[in-house]
Amino acid sequence: MSTQSIPQDRPNLVCPKCDDQFNKGDMRSFDKSDYNSFADDFACPSCGDAIHPEDALFAYFRAAPTAELSGRPVRVGGFATVGTKELDVGKTVEESLIGGGALDIDLALLAETNQPPGQTIRQLQGVTLEWYPGPQEINGVIVDIAQSSDTEIGFIASDLNSSSSTVTVAYNVLIHRSEVPQPPWVTLLADAITHYHRGQGLATFSLLFSAFENLLSRELSRTLRAGGWTDNPITDFLERNWTWEERCKDGLKTVTSKHFPTQHPSLYQDLYNLRGTRNNGIIHVDPSDSVADIDIKELKDAFETIMETMIAVNEMCYDERRSLN
């Protein structure tokens, strides 16, 4: 996994109008009392235009290779700290997190590395690392990362059977400001990624599709609202287009004039197959059968299919919302 193509040590927000990426300090000025207030107050710090945080998040997703997104921050305003560190075996080292305010760790990944200690995210650009959730055994040392306070993380190096007094590890810690509210689909996606890195296919499959379905309904609702619709007509519209298939086909065609299967035939087929695996292999399993065994390749394909589908849905709806302004 390449560590970056668009910087991930800055917030995962890119203005879809001027293409500038946010800085960490930019998040301090927005109203974070609740998600609606946050979205209403949100604007690009560079061009000053009012934008929606989810559109800025999708602009970031589009700027990064889809295969990398499972190791990147996905919560709104999230960022990563990536580097290499030499640890004394048998000791815990605490390190301050830069970002301002209380922070939450979303995911902590580790990798065995031959890189020298002290490498930064910029120096690791282009280096391929195999990330795993902690704890991880590296050369007879059990290494883990834990949050020790709302501004610090601890690197833990426990001696298992090591002949060395130090061990060097690569780390990738995904972080977001605690007070930044999140839409439901982002919470579901972040949980799916946690299960993904732990190889828990059953939970990953279900959470991924839940994230997609929530995002799909939100994109339809936001676009209808941008066109002047109010709550009750929007609710009636979603009830008439109840299933994910109806919303991908008739729903999106009504709202954006674009029919998803026509626009993205291979992607729609992949999504349809993924839904079939979830329904027939996990949820509606025949009493005589076993629950599906989801292997690593299936997990990777499922994650990339869902991400590409969500990106495509946002792009179609964002283009329609922009045309209405």
Image: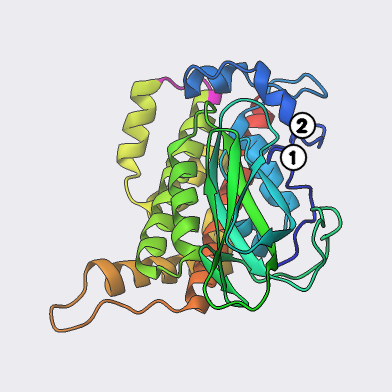
Q: How many marks?
A: 2
Q: Amino acid at mark 2?
A: Asn
**Residue 11 percent across, percent down from the top left:** 70, 38
On screen, 250 above or below 40?
below
Residue at the (70%, 62%) spot, across then down: 170
Binning the other alpha carbons within 10 Å of mark 2 as few (below 14), some (14 to 19) or many (20 upward) gives some
Type of amino acid at the residue the image marks with label 1: Arg
Of 7 and 136, nearer the camera is 136
Q: Where residue 3 sits in the image (x, y, percent)?
A: 75, 60
Report which quarter residue 142 is drawn in.
Answer: bottom right
Q: Secondary structure at mark 1?
A: loop
Magenta segment boundaries in residue numbering: 226-230
Up/down of 317 relative to 41, above or below: below
Viewer-proximal residue among 254 and 309: 309
Compare residues 153 and 229 and report the one nearer the observer: 153
Taking the view exactly as shown, the residue that stands out farthest to the left is 287
Tag 1 residue: 10
- Who's the residue at 25% across and 66% down the image? 283
The numbered dot on residue 23 is: 2
* Separation of residues labelled 2 and 1 (CA atoms): 6 Å
